[in-house]
């Protein structure tokens, strides 16, 4: 597995330090809410980030899961993403924190934010570990960002390529010869 890596983009130590900082910031905000926080996390890329983050949050919380799937369309405009499957506690009047691994075009988080909003929570914030440089659109607000990364495909710490590499403890690029021709 490690032989497939081209370059480490964010080291295990840097991730650990930054996740702890994000947790402190989030704990400060939601520690003031009596009802605690309901975290809505986007499968499967954010699982590693989520599990490290929530173990550093000494506050009352529930965790809900959503999945987002892409569907093909004949044109770029008719292609899209939809909220495919959800296992969610009641979000009505709750303080909701959406957690995802990475925001790239923002399409994924846009449908998650819309879906959560339609369930009339009291508040919504969003945390991502990574934001691809300059890509987050204005209509998809993100409140906590771990790292800004350049516009290259990365794997590790939950992020996959073709389902693999989620278990890497750091974030890295892959050797170019590993990508499928159509990717
Ligand atoms: P968006 O909908 O374009 O913002 O893309 C977000 C989703 O695409 C993320 O939740 C990831 O699952 C996936 N993704 C985007 N960029 C990368 C990457 O560099 N590596 C792995 N997955 C990525
Ligand atoms: Mg994802």
Image (cartoon, rainbow, N blue to C red):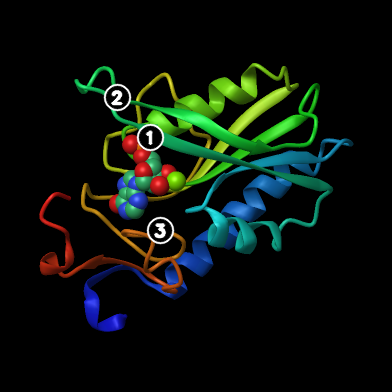
- Dot 1 and dot 3 residues touching (CB under 8 Å): no
Vertical order, 147 against 179 (above or below)? above
Between tags 2 and 3, which lies in front?
A: 2
Q: Which residue is mark 3?
A: 159
Residue 47 lies in quadrant: bottom right
Q: CA distance from mark 1 to mark 3?
A: 16 Å
How many C-alpha atoms fall within 10 Å of the one at disc 1: few (<14), some, or many (≥20)? few
Does residue 28 appear to the left or right of 179 in the view shown?
right
Q: Which mark is residue 70?
A: 1
List x then y, in percent, for residue 103: 39, 40
Residue at 17%, 50% (x, y): give it.
183
Quarter of the N terminus within the rendering: bottom left
Does residue 133 appear to the left or right of 92 in the view shown?
left
Residue 94 lies in quadrant: top right
List x then y, in percent, for residue 168: 41, 73
How many C-alpha atoms fall within 10 Å of the one at disc 3: few (<14), some, or many (≥20)? many
Q: Which residue is mark 2?
A: 79
- Dot 2 and dot 3 residues touching (CB under 8 Å): no
Vertical order, 107 against 75 (above or below)? below
Describe the element under mark 3 as helix, strand or loop.
loop
Vertical order, 18 against 134 (above or below)? below
Disc 3 C-beta below 8 A from ligand 1: yes
Q: CA distance from mark 2 to mark 3?
A: 22 Å
């Amino acid at each position: 597995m490690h032989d497939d890596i081209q370059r480490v983009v964010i080291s295990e130590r840097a991730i650990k330090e930054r996740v702890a900082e994000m947790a402190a910031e989030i704990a400060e905000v939601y520690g003031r809410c009596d009802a605690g926080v309901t975290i809505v996390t986007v499968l499967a890329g954010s699982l590693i980030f989520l599990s490290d983050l929530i173990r550093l949050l000494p506050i009352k919380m529930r965790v809900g899961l959503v999945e987002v799937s892409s569907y093909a369309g004949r044109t770029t405009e008719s292609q899209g993403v939809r909220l495919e499957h959800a296992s969610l506690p009641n979000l009505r009047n709750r303080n909701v924190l959406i957690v995802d691994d990475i925001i790239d075009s923002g399409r994924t988080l846009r449908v998650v934010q819309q879906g959560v909003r339609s369930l009339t929570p009291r508040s919504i914030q969003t945390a991502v570990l990574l934001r691809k440089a300059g890509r987050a659109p204005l209509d998809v607000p993100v409140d906590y960002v771990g790292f800004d990364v350049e516009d290259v495909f990365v794997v590790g710490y939950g992020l996959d390529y073709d389902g693999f590499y989620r278990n890497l403890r750091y974030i890295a690029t892959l050797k170019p010869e590993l990508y499928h021709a159509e990717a």
